Amino acid sequence: MMRIFLVLLMLVAGAGAAVAQGKPSAESGPIKVTGDTFIIDEGNGNATFTGNVEIVRAGLTVWAQKVVIDYGAGGVEDVQTMVATGQVRLKTKDQDATGDKATFDPNTQMLHMTGNVVVVNSTGTLTGPSLTVNLADNSTVFEGGKGKGGRVTGVFSTQ
């Protein structure tokens, strides 16, 4: 079960060295995961935290109603995806992002957040239906969608 926590640490630390190196770094410190329920389903290759999930690590806090980690034939060290749903919030010292769903693929280093995405930092606020962050090349794409409310909006303050 401790390996699941370490895997979750690597996934949650998306922007940090832990993900890039595939292992927790010494500077990352401990991780605290709380939720109402934690279930490991080895038969189906997943682990699920549900109910007021909170993941706290130095410099990063993640909240969601549900976090599901799917892993492959290699077990918990072969993580395929992490999906957080239900009032998802990722907060760092400099930035706060919210959305309905966040999916992270450690193999491609892609983080995708959808559903009423809002990113706030000291220089402004961006909103839109979809946000994709490529952690491998440090690029970010905010996308609008078709129909009502499908545009990306940015409000920026001057220094």
Image (cartoon, rainbow, N blue to C red):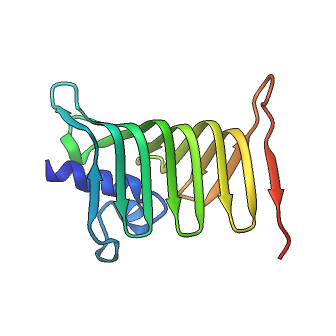
Toward the top, the furthest residue is: 147
Kindly identify the residue that appears in the image at 60 percent across and 36 percent down: 114
* Image quarter in which the C terminus is found: bottom right
Quick check: 87 left or right of 67?
right
Quick check: 152 left or right of 82?
right
Query: Residue 140 in the image: x percent, y percent?
Result: 66, 53
Q: Which image quadrant is residue 121 in?
A: bottom right
Above or below, 134 relative to 53: below
Q: Which image quadrant is residue 148 in?
A: top right
Q: Nearer the viewer, residue 82 or 71?
A: 82
Count of numbered tags: 0
Is residue 111 at all visible to an observer of this figure? yes
Query: Residue 79 in the image: x percent, y percent?
Result: 31, 43
Kindly identify the residue that appears in the image at 58 percent across and 57 percent down: 96
Query: Residue 36 in the image: x percent, y percent?
Result: 26, 38
Above or below, 113 relative to 91: above
Kindly identify the residue that appears in the image at 31 percent across and 51 percent down: 8
